[in-house]
Amino acid sequence: MNFLNAVVVGFKEIWAHKFRSVLTMLGIILGVSSLVGMSALVKGMENGMKEALVAIGGLEKVRLDENDIPAYQRYMADQAVGCTMNDVYALQKSAPLIRMVTPEMRMRDVTITRNGKYFNPFVFVGTWPNALEMNQHVVEYGRMFNEIDDEMARNVCVIGTETRDALWGTPEDLGYELNPVGQRITIKHQPFTIIGMFQHYESERERKVRELAKEKPVEPVRTNSPARSKGWGKRGSSYVYTLKNSTVYIPLNTMWVKFRSTAGSNNIPDARLSALSVKVADVETLEQAIQQAHNVLMHTHKGIEDFAFQTQEDWAENINRAIRNARISGGIIAAISLLVGGIGIMNIMLASITERIREIGIRKAIGASFMDIFIQILVESVVIAIIGGAAGLLTSLGLVRLLGVLSPTDNTPQITVNALLIAFAFSVGVGILAGLVPAFKAARLDPIQALRYE
Amino acid sequence: MALIEVRNVSKIYHLGGEEIRALDDLSLDIDGGEFIAIIGPSGSGKSTLMHILGCLDSPSKGTIRLDGTMIEKATPHQLSRIRNQKIGFVFQFFNLLPKLNVLQNVELPMIYSGLSGRERRERSMQALKLVGLENRANHRPMQISGGQQQRVAIARALVNNPKIIFADEPTGNLDSNTGDAILELFRQLSREGRTIALVTHDPEIAAVTPRRIEIRDGKIARQVDARLAGLDRQPRLANPLTQAT
Ligand SMILES: Nc1ncnc2c1ncn2[C@@H]1O[C@H](COP(=O)(O)OP(=O)(O)OP(=O)(O)O)[C@@H](O)[C@H]1O
Ligand SMILES: [Mg+2]
C-alpha cells in the first residue's frame, strides 16, 4: 500500500468518527497552543528586558563605584583617595580601550520645590554633558547643558519627565504636554533654570497602553481613597524607565561649587566622585578594557583597590537566567499537555484497532503485510496529531492575543515562527510515538485469529 | 512436481488439556489446473485445511510446498506476498469490509500489490463484470444480497489474477439457483486453467468436479479422480480478465 493511500484511509477513518477524533485532538490542541503561548510570553519578556538593558546604557557601559578596601590593605584605609577627577583624566589619557568617561557627583535626599509643590528625584547628579550619550538620554525640549555651562558652574538643570509631572502635572492631568524649559525651580534652596527636558521613557507596552487610553474618552476617575504615591516599585522592567524618568542632571562644576564644596565633613570639601561611568570601545574587548582601566586606576589610587567595576553583564545574565527559567517551566507545562494529548491518541488508536480486528484480519488475508498495516495505523495516528497540531496553531494565535489583553502592563507576547515550527514538529512527533504501539499490535495480528474475532 | 504438496500435516488445538486434531497426518498433492471438491462432515477439518493451504494459518506439524515455496520456512512478508499474488481466497462468510463499497472491496488486493488507481479501477470493473455485478459497484456490502456479496468476494479473489483459488463453501449460504450460477463461474475459471479447490457440502457440486476428496476426522477418507478414468483435460492458464469481452 502506498503512502498516499494510507493517508486517504486515515482521513476517512477519522472522518467516520468525527466527534471521537475531535475529542482526541483536543489534547494536542491544548498542548500545541500552550507551547506557542508560553514561548510567546517568554519572547515578550525577553523583548522587554532587552529594551530595558538598552535603556540603562547597553552592554558597553561600565560603572566604577567605590568599594570596600580588601582586608590586606585595610591598614592603608586612611590614605585611600576614592574616585576623583584625577581618575577621569587618567583614564582619558591612558586607557585607549575606553571610549568615553563620565564623572558623576551624586547627592541624595534632594528636594526640588516650585510653588509649594515638591519632588524628590531618584537620580540627582552633577555630570558632564557627555552623560547624555553615556546613559542613552534623549532631549525632547530645550538642550543639554554644555561645556560652558559646566565651566561657569551655571545654575541650570536638565530634568526627566517625572519632575515635570510632579511639579506641573502629567500631560494626562493637564490635557496638554507642558514644556518646562525656561521655568525656574528651587533645588536645595538654590534657584535653578530648567534648560532641557528628556523624553518620556517607557516600555513599548506602556506606550501602547497610553496611546490606547488616549483614543478613548477620558472617564473621570472616582476614588474614595486618598491619592497616594505608588512609589518607585512599579512593576517589572518599567521600574528601569521610572528611574530614568526621575533623573535630574546639573553641570558637574555647579554641583561642586554650589553643593559639594560646602558639604564635606569637618569643613573639608569632599572632592570625591560618587561614581564614574565609562564606555568601552568594543563589547568584545570588555575584559581587556576593564583590565586596562584597573591598571590605570591602581596608579591614581596609590595601589589601594578601593573601587570596583560594575558591568551590565550581570544584568544581562540575570535576564538570561530569568528567561531560561521561564522557558523551562513553560516548556514543562507544554510538554505535559502534549504528553497527555499523546496518551489520548494512543488510547483512541488502541480502541480503534480493537474495533477493527476483523477488518485487519481481512486485509491481511488478502495480502496486506506487516508494514502495510503498521503504516496504515501509524499514519492515522499522525494525521490526528497533524490536524490537532494545525488546529492548535490556530488556537494559539487567539490565545496569545488573549494573553496580551489579559496582561496589559507586561510586555506584548510575541509569536515567533520558530515556536510555531517547533510546536508543530512536536505534535507530529507525539502522533508518531503514540501510534507506534497500536500500529505494532495491529500489524502483528495473526490473520486467521483476527478473522475469527467477534 | 505438483503445484501444492502437502506432507504429513497435522493441526492440533489444545482446549483445556484436551487435544483436538483438526488435521491428522494429512498428505495431498494438487497439480496445476486441477478442479477439486473437498467434502466431509461438519467439523472434519475442511476449513482448517483450506486456511493452511491458503497460507492464512500454519500447521502444527508437517510441510507444505506451494508453487516451489516451503510455507513453514517463509517469512510473514513472503506469506503476505503469496496470499496477495498467487492465491485468491473466497471465505465461507464473504468477509467484505462493510465500510467500503463493492468496487473498493474488489480493489483492496491491488492496493497491496501497488497498482495505480486507474488500473485498479479498470480491473475491478472487469472482475465485477465477470460476476455480473458491474451495476452494483457503488453499493455497500450491506445493501446487496448474500449471493451478490459472495460474487463480490469471488471478484475480489480473482482480481489479482491468481494461479490458485480456494473457496470455503462458496455456495453454502445461497439458494440453489445462485449456487448453480456461482458453480458455473468456477467451472469457467477452471476451463481457463486455474487451480481451484472448493469446500462443499453439496454432493451435486462435488459430482461435477474432476477430483473429489473426502475428509473425515482430519484425514483423507476417500478420493475420486476423474482423470484416472480418462477424463483428463489439458490445463491451460489464461487471464479471465483480459479475455472477458
Ligand atoms: N480455533 C480453534 N480452537 C479449537 N478448535 C478448533 C479451532 N478451530 C477449529 N477447531 C476444531 O477443529 C475441527 C475442524 O474445524 P473446521 O472448521 O476445519 O471444520 P469444518 O470441516 O470446516 O466444519 P464446517 O463444515 O462446519 O465448516 C473442529 O472440531 C473444530 O472444533
Ligand atoms: Mg468450515
Image (spheres, coloured by chain):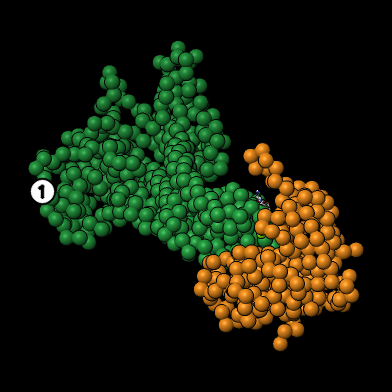
Residue located at (74% from left, 70% from top): B206
Q: Mark 1 lies on which chain?
A: A
- Residue B179 is situated, as x and y percent measured from the top left of the image, at 64, 74
Chain letter for the green part: A
Comparing A7 with B168, the one in front is B168
Instruction: Name the outermost residue toward the left.
Output: A224
Q: Tell me the orange chain.
A: B
Residue where numbered disc 1 is placed: A222
Determine crowd level at label 1: few under 14, some 14-19, many 20+ residues with C-alpha closer than 10 A: few
Going by the numbered disc 1, the residue's amino acid type is Arg
- The quarter of the image holding the N terminus of chain A is bottom right
Classify the position of the C terminus of chain A by image quarter. bottom right
| Secondary element at image label 1 | loop
List x then y, in percent, for residue A242: 29, 43
Q: Which residue is drawn at 53% across and 38% down?
A: A286
Query: Could you tell me which residue is drawn at 53 percent across and 67 percent down?
Result: B99
Q: Relative to residue A159, is residue A386 depicted above or below?
A: below
Residue at the image position 36 percent from the left and 28 percent from the top: A272
